[in-house]
Image (cartoon, grey):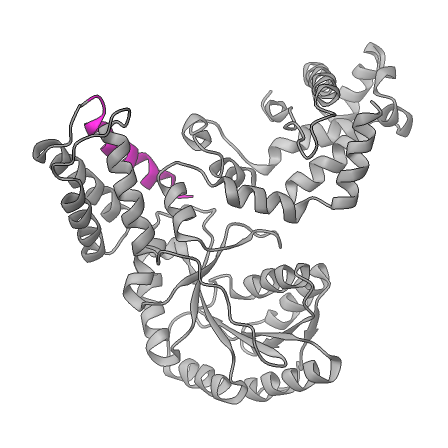
C-alpha cells in the first residue's frame, strides 16, 4: 500500500543524504518535496501544509547526532508527525452491553458488507459469540451476500427477506441475539451510491432504535478526499465512533488515511487489505507511518502469523522436523496457512526494506500456483516420500502440472534445501525458515 507516496518521500529524503548537518537551505528543499508528495497522494492541502510546517519547525537547525545521518533524522521527525496526524495511538472498540451492538454504515461499494463478515470472523477468533444482522434492504443480493459470507466464516446471519423495514429488522435481530445468547451483534445497514436525506434518516432511526455501543463508518480508501468528505457528512449526522479504511491493497495513494482523522476528529479503528476473511487489521498510527516511510511493520506481520497458524498443526510440523520426516504433505499444509495471512504484496510491505527491494517484481497470490500444481500432481506415495521422485517421475510431474521440468527440478532442490535448514534449526523452538520457491511463478 502507498507505494507511490513511499517512493516520493524516499526521493525527498535523498536531498539530505551525505550532508553533515540539517540547515535552512537543505531542509527547506526536502520539506517542499515532502509537501508535494503528500498533495500528490491526495492528502488535504491544509493538512499537508500543517504536517510539513511542523516538520520544518522541528528540523530546522538541528545538529545531526553522531552516527545518525541527516536523512535519518528527518525521517524520524516525519514519522512522528505522520503518527500524530493519524491519531497517535490505537483506539479499540468499546464492547459493552448484553449484547454489544456494532452498527456499520457507509456508501455502496465501499466494502461495508465484506467488512461486517471480516469483523465477525475476527471477533469469533477471540472467542466471542457473534450475530450478523442483514439490514440492507435495498441493494440486490445484499442479504444473500452476507449469508454466504456468514456461512464461510461460521457465523450466524439474521435476515428477514420479506421485511422492508430496516429498523424493525435491526430490532428483531437484537431480540434474536438475546434469545440465542449472542454477545455481539453486527448490524449491516444499507449503503447508497451517494449521500441522500432518505438514507441519513433511516440510519439515524436505526441508531436511535438499537442504541449501538459502536458506530463504524466504512470508506473506500481509493476514493481519496471524496472518502474524507463523505465521512464528514456522515459524522455530522451520526457522530460515529470510528472509521474503517478498505481496499488499502489497491491503488491507494494514502490521502484518506492521512486526512480523515484531522477532518472528522474520529479514530481509524480498522484497515482492510483484501477479500479474505483474515485481511483485517486493527489500526495503529505508528505502524502505518512506518509502512508509509518504507520501514515495514513487523509487529503486524507477527500478529497475522499468530492468527493464521494453527497451534496444533505447528506442533505436529515441529515434531516431524525433529524426526527428519518433513514431506510434501506438510509443505502444502504450511503453504495454505501462509496464504491465510493475506495477499503476498501486503505481507512483503510489512517486511522492512522489502517493498523497496522488490518494487520492480510483480507480486501476486498466483506465485504459489505452480508450486501447488506440482505437489498436487504427485501420488500420495510421492508426497510422503519425496526421495523417490526420480528423473522420470519429475518429467511426469511437469507434464501433469502444466509446468516445466526446470520448475519441477527447482522445487525439488529448494525443498531439499529447506529440509536441511529445518534439520539445522530443529533445536531453535518457535522459529521456522521461510518457504522458498517463490520464483517458480516466473518461467
Please tell me whether residue 5 belongs to the stretch shown in magenta. yes
Q: Is residue 376 left or right of residue 298?
A: right
Q: Main secondary structure of the magenta part?
A: helix
Tell me where residue 77 sits by quadrant: top left
Choose between 35 and 202: the one closer to the eye: 35
- Give whichever of 143, 186 is nearer the camera: 186
* Residue 240 in magenta stretch: no
Q: Residue furthest right?
A: 381
Which one is in front, 426 or 346? 426
Find the residue positioned furthest to the front. Answer: 66
Q: Quadrant of the N terminus?
A: top left
Could you tell me residue 384's position as x and y percent? Answer: 87, 27
Residue positioned most to the top: 391
Q: Residue at x 47, y 41 (%)?
A: 297
Q: Is the residue 329 above or below the residue 203 in the image?
A: above
Position of residue 2 measured from the top left corner of the image (x, y, whole percent): 38, 43
Quarter of the image with the C terminus is top right
Residue 287 as seen in the image, left or right of residue 275: left
In the displayed structure, would residue 121 be above or below residue 27? below
Q: At 85% from the left edge and 16% from the top edge, which residue is drawn?
A: 387
> Which residue appears at 56% of the width and 73% of the height?
95
Specify the farthest residue to the left.
25
> Total number of numbered labels?
0
* Residue 280 located left or right of residue 331: left
Residue 74 in sight in this render: yes
Give residue 158's position: percent from left, percent from top. 68, 77
Q: Which residues are magenta?
A: 1-18
> In the image, is residue 275 above or below residue 290?
below
Residue drawn where x is 15% and y is 40% of the image: 32
Amino acid at each position: 500500500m502507498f507505494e507511490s507516496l513511499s517512493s516520493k518521500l524516499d526521493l525527498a529524503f535523498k536531498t539530505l543524504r551525505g550532508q553533515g548537518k540539517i540547515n535552512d537551505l537543505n531542509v527547506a528543499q526536502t520539506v517542499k518535496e515532502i509537501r508535494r508528495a503528500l498533495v500528490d497522494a491526495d492528502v488535504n492541502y491544509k493538512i499537508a501544509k500543517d504536517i510539513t510546517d511542523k516538520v520544518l519547525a522541528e528540523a530546522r537547525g538541528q545538529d545531526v547526532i553522531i552516527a545518525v545521518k541527516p536523512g535519518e533524522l528527518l525521517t524520524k521527525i516525519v514519522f512522528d508527525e505522520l503518527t500524530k496526524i493519524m491519531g497517535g495511538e490505537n483506539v479499540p472498540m468499546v464492547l459493552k452491553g448484553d449484547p454489544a451492538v456494532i452498527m456499520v454504515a457507509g456508501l455502496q461499494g465501499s466494502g461495508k458488507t465484506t467488512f461486517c463478515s471480516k469483523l465477525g470472523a475476527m471477533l469469533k477468533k477471540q472467542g466471542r459469540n457473534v450475530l450478523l444482522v442483514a439490514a440492507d434492504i435495498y441493494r440486490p443480493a445484499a442479504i444473500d451476500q452476507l449469508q454466504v459470507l456468514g456461512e464461510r466464516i461460521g457465523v450466524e446471519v439474521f435476515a428477514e427477506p420479506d421485511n422492508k423495514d430496516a429498523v424493525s429488522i435491526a430490532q428483531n435481530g437484537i431480540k434474536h441475539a438475546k434469545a440465542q445468547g449472542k454477545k455481539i451483534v453486527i448490524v449491516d445497514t444499507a449503503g447508497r451510491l451517494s449521500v441522500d436525506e432518505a438514507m441519513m434518516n433511516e440510519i439515524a432511526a436505526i441508531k436511535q432504535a438499537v442504541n449501538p455501543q459502536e458506530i463504524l463508518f466504512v470508506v473506500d480508501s481509493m476514493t481519496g478526499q471524496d472518502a474524507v468528505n463523505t465521512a464528514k457528512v456522515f459524522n455530522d449526522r451520526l457522530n460515529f465512533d470510528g472509521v474503517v479504511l478498505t481496499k488499502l491493497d489497491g491503488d491507494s495513494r494514502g490521502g484518506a488515511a492521512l486526512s480523515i482523522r484531522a477532518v472528522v476528529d474520529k479514530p481509524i479503528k480498522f484497515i482492510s487489505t483484501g477479500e479474505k476473511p483474515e485481511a483485517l487489521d486493527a489500526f495503529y498510527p505508528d505502524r502505518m507511518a512506518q509502512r508509509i516511510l518504507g520501514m515495514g511493520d513487523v509487529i503486524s506481520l507477527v500478529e497475522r502469523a499468530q492468527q493464521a497458524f494453527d497451534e496444533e498443526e505447528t506442533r505436529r510440523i515441529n515434531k516431524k522436523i525433529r524426526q527428519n520426516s518433513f514431506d510434501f504433505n506438510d509443505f502444502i499444509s504450511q503453504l495454505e496457512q501462509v496464504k491465510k495471512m493475506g495477499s503476498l504484496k501486503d505481507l512483503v510491505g510489512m517486511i522492512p526494506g522489502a517493498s523497496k527491494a522488490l518494487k520492480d517484481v510483480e507480486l501476486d497470490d498466483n506465485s504459489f500456483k505452480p508450486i501447488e500444481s506440482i505437489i498436487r500432481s504427485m501420488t500420495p506415495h510421492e508426497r510422503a516420500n519425496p526421495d523417490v521422485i526420480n528423473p522420470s517421475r519429475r518429467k511426469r510431474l511437469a507434464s501433469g502440472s502444466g509446468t516445466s521440468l526446470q520448475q519441477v527440478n527447482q522445487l525439488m532442490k529448494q525443498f531439499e534445501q529447506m529440509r536441511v535448514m529445518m534439520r539445522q534449526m530443529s533445536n531453535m523452538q518457535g522459529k521456522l525458515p521461510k518457504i522458498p520457491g517463490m520464483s517458480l511463478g516466473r518461467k
